[in-house]
Amino acid sequence: MKPAVILVLCCLSMLTAGTLYMFSLYGQQFAARLHYTQTETNFVAIAGNYGMTFSGPLCGWVVDVFGPRRGSLLAAFFLATGYVAMALTYNEMLFSDSFILMSVYFAFVGTGGTFSYMSTISTLAKTFRTNRGVALGVPIAMYGLSALVWTAAGRFLFMGSDGLLDIPALLLFLGAGTCVINVNSAVWFAGAENAGKAAKDVVEDKDARGQSATEVTPLVGDQQEERMHMREEVVDLEGEPDLSGLALFKNLEVWAFVVSLIFLSGPGFMVINSVGAILASLYQPTTTTQSSLAALQSTHVMILSALSSAGRIGGGVVSDFLKRHHISRLWSYIAFGVVMFTAQTIGAAFVDKIEGVVAVTVLTGLVSWQRRGSSWHVVDRRRLVGYAW
């Protein structure tokens, strides 16, 4: 199968993996329809994040053992089940509209997103042996743009004349769209897996029968090049020992990295999950403002999505810039922390003004995902064994 086809399919799959971050678009209409308190609404949002995060090891194991094809099928199942159950609950067509059950459904969405993400990354890693940075970078950028793309589509298709979104139709659209894309990817990923196995069998068959000197020569060259690359890595990592086990807990840089990661993640997720509620609290509940509120909420979700995609790239750029100037990559986290502190300060200073939310959204979108864009570089430099999804 052509690598270009695989790349396109992986980009589409990544667009389904980040739909979790659209919650602010419809969370407040859920709360109003089902009479959830703000605490219960926040619990639902957090449950989705927990479903995405805690399912990481399991999803990775499934994809490693059974392949990305089955991972994509499971992604289709979890995403479709979660979104359809949420739509039926919104219309009060299920046996209960409890926020606990809604949290379970949204956790399904998070788990489906992780399955889609893991399956895509696995397929890319197995398909692209060269130019892997670009092959990984483009689909991961699509993951960041996921909320923007689906929000724009939902706003175009399901925004009523009264300015309000048709939430059940939007959720069913998300369930059907993410399911179809992942099932289609599973079909094509199966072809890629079979092609990979066939190529592996041919190589093993050649090894069993023996190869000519001409056939061996390129392999020797590749091995020599690989050894040279390994030596370069050893020189580059000199003075940066591997850290694992209890040594992790005794290293001050590790603690600085973990604490800064926590403080960057918490405020970021708070704004991402609650920007819709923040905007709603600054509006008077009148018919005129409700229509503009729905449009404003969708705009902020798209801003967060677009800037998060840019932030993933920007975090790596900043980290590489520091390395070229022989500065520890950990200093990038201090810079990101200053930006996040500025965002929160602006939010506190203009807590009663809608204009202040724009600055908070922009700065949070830029920084909240830079933590992940640069964290891989920090971890790779310090070789922190055990850091994962």
Image (cartoon, helix red, strand yellow):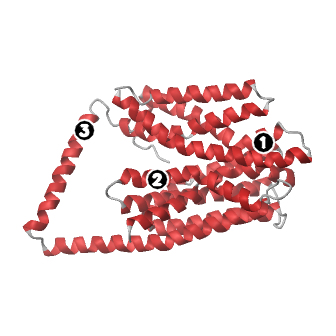
Q: In the structure shown, which secondary structural element does the residue marked by tag 1 occupy?
A: helix
Residue 139, compared with residue 187, is above or below; it is above
Instruction: Choose top left, top right, bottom left or bottom right for residue 2.
Output: bottom left
Q: Quadrant of the N terminus?
A: bottom left
Of all residues shown, which one is farthest toward the left? Answer: 213
Mark 2: few, some, or many residues within 10 Å (few <14, many ≥20)? some
Q: Position of residue 214 (x, y in %)?
A: 9, 66
Amino acid type shown at disc 1: Ala
Q: In the shown orientation, is residue 291 left or right of residue 357?
A: right
Asked if one can make out residue 271 in the rendered structure from this viewpoint, the answer is yes
- Nearest the viewer among 341 and 155 is 155
For marks 3 and 1, the one nearer the N-term is 3
Give the label, 3 or 1, closer to the camera: 1
- Asked if labels 1 and 3 touch by Cβ distance under 8 angstroms, the answer is no
Nearer to me, 249 or 57: 57
In the displayed structure, does residue 312 sit left or right of residue 158? left
Kind of residue sitting beneath label 3: Val
Spatial CA span between label 1 and label 2: 32 Å
The residue carrying mark 2 is: 138
Foreground mark, 1 or 2, reads: 2
Q: Residue at x 61, y 68 (%)?
A: 179
Residue at 39% across / 58% down in the picture? 125
- Disc 3 target residue: 234
SS for tag 2?
helix
Q: At 41% from the left edge and 39% from the top edge, which residue is drawn? A: 377
Instruction: Report the residue marked by disc 1.
Output: 277
